[in-house]
Image (tube, helix red, strand yellow):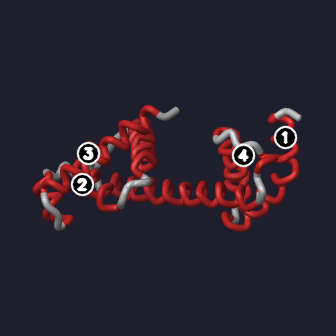
């Protein structure tokens, strides 16, 4: 049996269960449908053979839980961004198109930095968004300038590596 037909049977066997499982967590049918579809897309992207999964629902549940977490994190990021924009005077506020581009960039950066320690992300954001110098960042984080430099190297490396991934 081909991988495509295995995946088709796998989908038909587990999609309804997964959709209900996600819907209980999100309490929103549209978001649940999107997350379920994205879960199966992740399965395809990872090139996992469904026949080799001992506990397929546990696997699907784990992937879906990560996607839900990412969704909430993106929503919090978007909300923080919008709150920050609301503080800007109207004449310097970005256009709706620029807002969307900036939000997409922030989401990409957030995803790129997601596996780094919080303090590394903070140092990067202080530098890139707030324009703080390494001295000021070191003072705020109560670390040395050399440590800030290492944090920045880590963060920039992650951003660069994320650009290389499809």
Mark number displayed over residue 35: none
Tell me how far mark 2 sits from mark 1, CA to CA.
48 Å
Where 99 falls versus 133 (above or below)? above
Mark 1 lies on a secondary structure that is: helix
Label 4, label 1: how far apart the Cα atoms are: 13 Å
What residue is drawn where x is 73% and y is 67%? 24
Residue ID at (17%, 52%): 132
Q: Which residue is mark 1?
A: 6
Q: Which residue is mark 2?
A: 126
Disc 4 designates what residue? 40
For label 2, the crowd category at 10 Å Cα-Cα, with few meaning under 14, some 14 to 19 and many 20 or more, is some
Q: Looking at the picture, how far across and down is residue 9, in whole percent?
A: 88, 44
Asked whether disc 2 touches disc 1, contact meaning CB atoms under 8 Å apart, the reply is no
Q: Is residue 127 left or right of residue 157?
A: left
Q: Closer to the observer: label 2 or label 3?
A: 3
Residue assigned mark 3:
153
Residue at disc 3, secondary structure: helix
Quarter of the image where the N terminus is located: top right
Upstream in sequence: badge 2 or badge 1: 1
In the picture shown, does residue 11 fall above or below 116?
A: above
Front one among 159 and 91: 159
Q: Is residue 124 left or right of residue 77?
A: left
């Amino acid at each position: 049996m081909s991988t495509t037909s295995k995946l088709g049977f796998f989908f038909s066997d587990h999609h309804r269960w997964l959709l209900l499982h996600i819907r209980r967590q999100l309490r929103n049918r549209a978001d649940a449908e999107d997350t379920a579809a994205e879960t199966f897309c992740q399965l395809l992207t990872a090139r996992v053979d469904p026949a080799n999964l001992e506990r397929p629902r546990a696997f699907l549940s784990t992937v879906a839980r990560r996607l839900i977490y990412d969704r909430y994190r993106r929503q919090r990021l978007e909300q923080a961004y919008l709150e920050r924009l609301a503080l800007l005077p109207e004449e310097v506020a970005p256009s709706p198109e620029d807002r969307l581009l900036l939000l997409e960039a922030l989401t990409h950066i957030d995803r790129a930095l997601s596996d780094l320690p919080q303090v590394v992300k903070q140092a990067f954001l202080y530098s890139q968004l707030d324009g703080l110098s390494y001295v000021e960042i070191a003072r705020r984080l109560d670390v040395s300038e050399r440590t800030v430099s290492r944090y920045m190297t880590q963060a920039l490396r992650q951003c660069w590596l994320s650009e290389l991934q499809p």
